[in-house]
Image: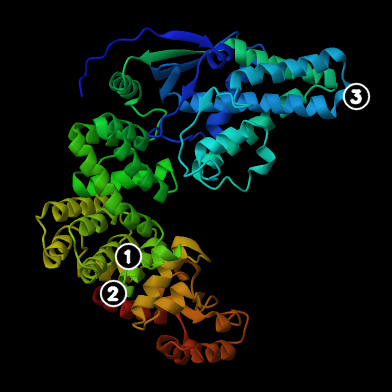
Amino acid sequence: MSGIVNIPVPSHFRMGNLFTDNNFEVPVYQRYYAWKHNEVEDFWNDLLDLVQGNRNGHFFGQLVTVKHDDVQEVIDGQQRLTTSSILLAVLRDIAADWNKNQHDVMSDNSSDMLRDIMRGVGQCLRGNDGERASLLLQKTGQSPDDDSDVRSFFNRLMRQTESNMVETAQTEPTKNLLNAYQTLKKLVLKEVKKSKLMTERVGELNRVYECFTRDFYVVIISALSNEDAFIIFETLNSRGKDLKASDIIKNHLMSISGNQISEANEKWQMMSSRLKDNSDRITRFIRTYWAARKRLVVESNLYRNLSQDLKTTNDAENFLDDLDNLVNLYDVLESPTSPKANREYFKNDVLSEQLDILNRLNVKLYYPIALALKMSGYAESDMVKVMNKVLSVFVRHRVIMNEGTNSLETGFSMIAEQIYSGQLNTVGAINQKMDEKLLKSNVQVEGNFKTLQREDSSRGQKKWTLMYLLSGLYEEELYQSVFIDDDYQLIHLDEENIQTDQLDAIGNWTLLEKSLANKFDQTTSLNDRTELLGKSKLIENRKLATQLPTWSMEMVNERQNHLAKLVTTVW
């Protein structure tokens, strides 16, 4: 792609004229509407400064477009244009509601003012009675009635049907559109209702409308070609200040796809749809893929690294093919048991169990290795062996040694790169490399485990980490009952005779069936607690039942030392 741009002459518009004098359309390859509450509130606060007289005008930024006949194709600025349209719709809908339901408490002048607002917004938004709307978002659905279609959802929202749209806002972009409408409506009403009288409220509403249409302004940079527009866009946004890395990466891929842009966009949309069109997830996925294929980079440098390597139509095609091949696996890694399709993605039950456990332990650093194994065509039985080593590395490094994750992230990525490149081409070589680079020694792990403590937690990572540690050491097949059926509960063996600073020592913890644990209270007599442990299905608990009557700090330490000898065998 040439780096020389035919420099366009910028045009400036007040927001009212911007919509009345232009037809905008967002091409299908652009990112979806992504503003959340904070961005919408910042937009409102800028307008509120004008409404309250703190400023006289506000520059709302630049738009980058390519003009085709009478349509401005939006390359950059969709978020601002869409939010502006939503605000105008909010002002119109409030005016229409008041004109209908508050007519009796208003003067003729107030009624005229409301109708002027409605008429002015109508001229800005257009789109009724077969007329072309001033802004058309991406066409994403299969038909005009498809609830997932961003364009049709936005069009309905612009036609005063917000009350009927809550149930149809199922995708991330449609939820964002509806949330922006609801947020702005709430903020506008909060401001105008500071006035007591209805006539004063109407005046305030009109002031909001005039300040926005008259005192907000933008600059349009209308390029002569898509190629020029893409270059301008990347130059303005390469630092990623307002965009997710995935958004500008998508723009780059489209810009180098040439006459294959439709096919490239279709591949991107399929990948994006699998990740619920969530820009954060897409960015994490691409960063994980790049860590497996090339190198580990921080998110802020992701676009710059990719753009240096991806320069041709063929590069874009191969990149998108890889994403298409890996996105289902990535979705499984993030959520191994839900939905059903994720749970059934692997035929090997042991592999599915391993990924579920890693997810419960909130381990994500190994994702590049999983993607690299997939790209290199390893069988599921081979992946089981590698994931078993990943679990050993993590449990030793993080759970027992409590060391930071930076070295793990770097190490896993390095190994993934070597799997992808073929430098590590057998399971034995992969696991040996992890042993050499990442696995903590038996001496270190056993020594640290002897003093290891884990605090109580009823849910989340802390709960599952301790449960996994104990269930692994008990040497019984407990995955289904502990992790799926959730039949067991963590309990302290004794809370009365153990020093407070040693209460959470691993030697003082056990897993007990919930039906028994509900009765295992420290206020219950020692004989009853002993009897409850003796009724457990777990061999370890029945052994503990014989020891509980004489339980002491010495016995906690003795048990923990015994478990420490098992740790390096299990992991």
Q: Which residue is drawn at the image coordinates 26% and 35% (left, top)? A: 260
Residue 446 in picture, x, y percent from top left: 26, 71
- In this rendering, position of residue 320 left or right of residue 83: left
Instruction: Please tell me which residue lies in front, 441 or 286.
Output: 286
Q: Are marks 1 and 2 in contact (CB under 8 Å)?
A: yes
Q: Quadrant of residue 68?
A: top left
The kind of residue tagged 1 is: Ile
Which mark, by number, is residue 104?
A: 3
Task: Name the outermost residue toward the left.
Answer: 423
Tell me the mark number nearer the camera, choosing from 3 and 1.
3
Q: Residues within 10 Å of mark 3 (few under 14, many from 20)?
A: few
Instruction: Please tell me which residue lies in front, 395 or 100.
Output: 100
Residue at numbered disc 1: 400
Which mark, by number, is residue 567?
A: 2
**Figure check: 319 above or below 543:** above
First in sequence: mark 3 vs mark 1: 3
Indicate the quadrant containing the C terminus: top left, top right, bottom left or bottom right.
Answer: bottom left
Q: Which residue is drawn at the image coordinates 65% and 20% (left, top)? A: 121
The kind of residue tagged 2 is: Val
